[in-house]
């Protein structure tokens, strides 16, 4: 890298364009607009192409010129390059010609897409000299910050709503992080973290480090394009909590096409939420460009953000690309989880049930055409949200270790399979 | 008096203070009082029409004022008002 900040030029306000040095800060002093990393695309164009990408190890850092760190990654070096699965059985069930699953339920090391954003945020935090890292989280982010901070030898505080699924809580505690449960919704956790970040000199990955952190999500979109054979999918369905992932998948398609790495073809990005927390899809369906904040009540706790930071920008991406938004009930979420599991052998968390459930609705309504091709972004692993499905997926039948008992059971339940 | 938590984004303008005490009966009056004391604060927090920007969240005693009466939300002595950038989290 020829200068000290790699391919980054500055932090830039998305609203007024005011530029700031590449420090730990996330909003513009003049209008509170979000700061984004500005890159030197002319230099990137000279360095990055398909051959260079293919020559590198299969992880998210193969696109490192488009990720906001100055030097080599020091945290999460093996994150990403998760499978993109051709999902023919699910495609038949949903009634679409071609369907793909981008499976971040098996992302390394903590089984969600959050490992992508965290590896960028913590690598950048180390570059900026922080020793303590922290986050406000609905669960997956806390898991990833706790694990990656442990591996990097950083002090770690994670702040979560006190009533999260046990799997998400244990998956933060085990790494030795300080886990603080807040008696309130995520939005209240978030507010507290903004106040703490204003007082303590810590790297809050999704507060003062957010411009870097959010960019990590682009790697999911870069991988989708590469794994599809260097093309942009016609349709992409993305679940939304803050809405950040959806905007960054869009940005990844813009960047690769602008740099000539993929041909510029039209794409539509669709947003998925739970009906019990649907500020963004409610606004999208009403044709509004702003959302009304909500108090969440859904089993999709990882998406339970009533005041989504990027809601405004997610609405804009759906509108600009001609995408749709929709939401599904708790029962439809569980059905989505089962559909994906039974058709493709992938056990997604509740957010994945949201994505599958909404894709089903959008295909049924023709908003995603039956003769088209779609990618569903699966962001987290079902083993972490067992609470949501226990009692809804049947029970094992316990019998004695006896062939006679087994055949009695079989003749009751599957008589066609009984051997004479 | 009402206690205002000033976010880092505004501290340079507010003489480096992280909390400020003002006399105000509503959230709207808080912004007015801050403007009197620290010229320029209103433009940072409000748009051209004088409405609190979408990029700014205001909480009174831990509740988002959009769930209360927005800038008309009443205040009593001892209340705490927290000003937070909206673009965080997730």
Image (cartoon, rainbow, N blue to C red):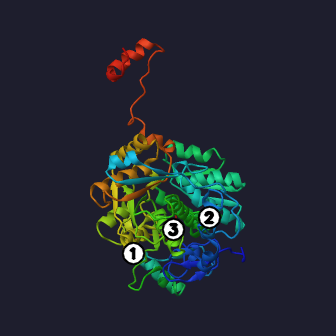
Q: Is A90 left, or right, of A214 in this rendering?
A: left
> From the image, which quarter does the N terminus of chain A lie in?
bottom right
Q: Secondary structure at mark 1?
A: helix
Where is residue B79 drawn, in percent x and y? 48, 67
Residue under label 1, please give it.
B71
Q: Position of residue A190 (x, y in %)?
A: 51, 61
- Report the chain holding disc 3: A
Could you tell me if the residues under marks 3 and 1 are in contact, i.e. CB atoms within 8 Å?
no
Q: Secondary structure at mark 2?
A: helix
Q: Which residue is mark 2?
A: A53
Mark 3 sits on what residue?
A: A252
Q: Chain of mark 2?
A: A
Mark closer to the observer (3, 1) = 3
Where A142 sits versus B73, above or below? above
The disc, 2 or 3, on the residue closer to the chain's N-terminal end is 2
Q: Indicate the position of residue B63 as horizontal and vertical percent values.
A: 44, 63
Residue in the foreground of this view, choosing between A203 and A391 = A391
Q: Return the residue nearer the eye: A336 or A156.
A: A336
């Amino acid at each position: 890298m020829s200068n000290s900040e790699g391919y980054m030029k500055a932090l830039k306000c998305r609203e007024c364009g005011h530029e700031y040095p590449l420090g730990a800060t996330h909003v513009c002093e003049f209008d509170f607009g979000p700061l984004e990393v500005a890159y030197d695309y002319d230099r990137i164009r000279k360095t990055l192409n398909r051959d260079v990408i293919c020559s590198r190890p299969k992880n998210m850092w193969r696109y490192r010129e488009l990720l906001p760190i100055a030097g080599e990654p020091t945290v999460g070096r093996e994150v990403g390059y998760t499978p993109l699965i051709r999902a023919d059985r699910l495609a038949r069930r949903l009634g679409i010609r071609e369907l793909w699953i981008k499976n971040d339920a098996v992302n390394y090391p903590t089984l969600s897409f959050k490992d992508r954003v965290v590896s960028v945020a913590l690598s950048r935090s180390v570059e900026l000299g922080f020793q303590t890292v922290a986050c406000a989280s609905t669960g997956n982010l806390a898991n990833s910050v706790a694990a990656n901070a442990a591996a990097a030898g950083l002090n770690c505080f994670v702040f979560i709503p006190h009533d999260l699924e046990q799997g998400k809580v244990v998956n933060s505690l085990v790494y030795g992080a300080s886990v603080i449960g807040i008696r309130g919704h995520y939005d209240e956790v978030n507010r507290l973290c903004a106040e703490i970040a204003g007082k303590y000199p810590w790297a809050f990955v999704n507060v003062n480090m957010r411009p870097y952190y959010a960019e990590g999500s682009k790697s999911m979109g870069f991988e989708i394009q590469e794994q599809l054979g260097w093309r942009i999918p016609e349709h992409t369905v993305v679940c939304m909590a803050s809405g950040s992932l959806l905007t960054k998948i869009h940005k990844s398609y813009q960047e690769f096409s602008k740099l000539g790495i993929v041909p510029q073809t039209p794409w539509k990005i669709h947003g998925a939420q739970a009906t019990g927390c649907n500020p963004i899809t409610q606004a999208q369906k009403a044709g509004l460009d702003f959302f009304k904040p909500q108090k969440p009540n859904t089993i999709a706790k990882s998406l339970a953000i009533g005041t989504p930071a990027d809601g405004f920008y997610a609405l804009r991406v759906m509108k600009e690309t001609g995408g749709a938004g929709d939401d599904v009930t708790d029962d439809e979420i569980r059905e989505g989880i089962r559909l994906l599991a039974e058709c493709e052998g992938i056990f997604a968390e509740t957010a994945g049930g949201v994505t599958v459930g909404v894709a089903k609705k959008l295909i049924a309504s023709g908003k995603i055409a039956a003769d088209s091709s779609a990618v569903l972004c699966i962001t987290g692993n079902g083993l972490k949200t067992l609470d949501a499905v226990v009692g809804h997926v049947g029970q094992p039948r316990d019998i004695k270790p006896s062939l006679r008992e087994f055949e009695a059971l079989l003749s009751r339940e599957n008589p066609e399979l009984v051997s004479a | 008096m009402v206690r205002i938590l000033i976010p880092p984004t505004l501290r340079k303008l507010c003489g480096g203070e992280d909390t400020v005490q003002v006399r105000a009966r509503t959230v709207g009056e808080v912004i007015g009082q801050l403007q009197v004391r620290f010229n320029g604060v209103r433009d940072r927090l409000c748009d051209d029409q004088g409405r609190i920007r979408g990029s700014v969240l205001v909480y009174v005693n831990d509740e988002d004022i959009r769930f209360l009466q927005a800038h008309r939300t009443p205040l009593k002595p001892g209340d705490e008002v927290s000003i937070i950038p909206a673009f965080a989290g997730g």
